[in-house]
């Protein structure tokens, strides 16, 4: 039985990935933060490094430390590394974003991610960088979408920027399945495989329209009060870090799915209507869903 070590298994990408690997018949080991990762990785075929500093805390110091841990564990065990990448690297470059897009970040966190990827590439180890947009799952737990849909039961949605701007989203059950599928063909991939997970591209207005279509009810679309974070920024680290990424909510962007399609030609993502239906069920509005409208 193939073995995967998942670092960050209690987080968003890590928890979904652990479930997906287990469903595919892999032995899943969960790394305990603060222990010896080199020792934990012994006998592993794949290491998923889904660890991140919590709530954007001290990225410049902690991300390189986590990266060094993962590289050391993979070098000692001979395992392939799978690392979730972000869109922070690209700044405001022309879209769609893909492996050939110049990485010109316009934020501190983007610069940290560029350096992180450079370290993985320079390691000479087999690395699969699976790059996704904003995370969204079936339980509304993700940070951005969790806030946006916090009042969905009251038929209210919050947009962090222009509600008509298309943005890249990674539905985590799909992205986790892609990670497993790539792990199973890892021997055929390039040494450093930069693979964008195009996922879904939609606007908040389109999401609201899907909710309305499926329930026959109207949903109010409001705007996030960024001024509150401005007041909190001097004494709340998360507020400062969120403000730095505000540009992404008004920047139309998408990821190029060509690379993933070339290596996993039969991979299919969940449609927006089904993702929206999952959010409605979590909000307790599942009784109002018209199944015919989900499948339409």
Image (tube, rainbow, N blue to C red):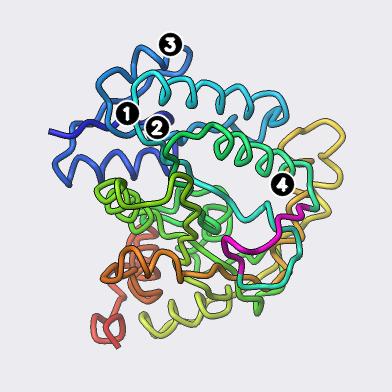
Q: Are marks 2 and 1 in contact (CB under 8 Å)?
A: no
Residue carrying label 2 = 10
Q: What is the spatial separation of the Cα atoms under label 2 and label 3, in whole angstroms? A: 15 Å
Residue 57 falls in image quadrant: top right
Q: What is the spatial separation of the Cα atoms under label 4 and label 1, in whole angstroms? A: 26 Å
Element at label 4: helix
On residue 35, the disc is 3
Q: Are marks 3 and 4 in contact (CB under 8 Å)?
A: no
On residue 5, the disc is 1
Please report the residue visible at 50 percent of the width from the left and 34 percent of the height from the top: 124
Give the mark nearest the N terminus, 1 or 3: 1
Between tags 2 and 1, which lies in front? 1
Give the mark nearest the N terminus, 2 or 1: 1
Please report the residue visible at 18 percent of the width from the left and 31 percent of the height from the top: 27
Q: What is the spatial separation of the Cα atoms under label 1 and label 3, in whole angstroms? A: 13 Å
Give the mark nearest the N terminus, 3 or 4: 3
Quarter of the picture holding the N terminus: top left
Q: What is the spatial separation of the Cα atoms under label 3 and label 4, in whole angstroms? A: 28 Å
Element at label 3: loop
Q: Which residues are magenta?
A: 97-105
Residue 63 falls in image quadrant: top right
């Amino acid at each position: 039985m193939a073995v995967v070590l998942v670092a960050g298994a209690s987080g968003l990408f890590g928890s979904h990935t652990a479930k997906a690997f287990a469903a595919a018949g892999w032995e899943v080991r969960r790394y305990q933060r603060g222990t010896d990762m080199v020792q934990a990785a012994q006998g592993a075929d794949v290491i998923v490094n889904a660890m991140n500093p919590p709530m954007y805390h001290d990225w410049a110091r902690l991300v390189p430390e986590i990266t060094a841990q993962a590289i050391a564990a993979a070098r000692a065990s001979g395992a392939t590394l799978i690392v979730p990448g972000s869109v922070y690297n690209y700044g405001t470059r022309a879209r769609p974003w893909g492996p050939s897009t110049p990485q010109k970040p316009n934020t501190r966190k983007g610069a940290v991610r560029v350096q992180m990827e450079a370290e993985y590439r320079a390691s000479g180890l087999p690395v699969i960088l699976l790059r996704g947009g904003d995370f969204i799952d079936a339980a509304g737990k993700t940070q951005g979408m969790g806030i946006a849909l916090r009042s969905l039961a009251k038929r209210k949605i919050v947009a962090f920027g222009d509600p008509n701007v298309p943005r890249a989203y990674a539905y985590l059950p799909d992205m986790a399945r892609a990670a497993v599928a790539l792990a199973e063909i890892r021997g055929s991939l390039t040494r450093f495989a930069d693979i964008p997970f195009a996922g879904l591209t939609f606007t908040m207005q389109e999401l609201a329209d899907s909710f309305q279509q499926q329930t026959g009810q109207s949903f109010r679309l409001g705007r996030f009060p960024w001024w509150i974070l401005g007041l909190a920024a001097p004494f709340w680290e998360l507020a400062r870090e969120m403000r730095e990424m505000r540009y992404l909510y008004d920047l139309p962007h998408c990821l190029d799915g060509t690379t993933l399609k070339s290596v996993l030609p039969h991979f299919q993502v969940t449609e927006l209507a089904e993702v929206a239906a999952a959010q409605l069920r979590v909000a307790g509005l599942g009784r109002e869903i018209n199944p015919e409208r989900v499948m339409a």
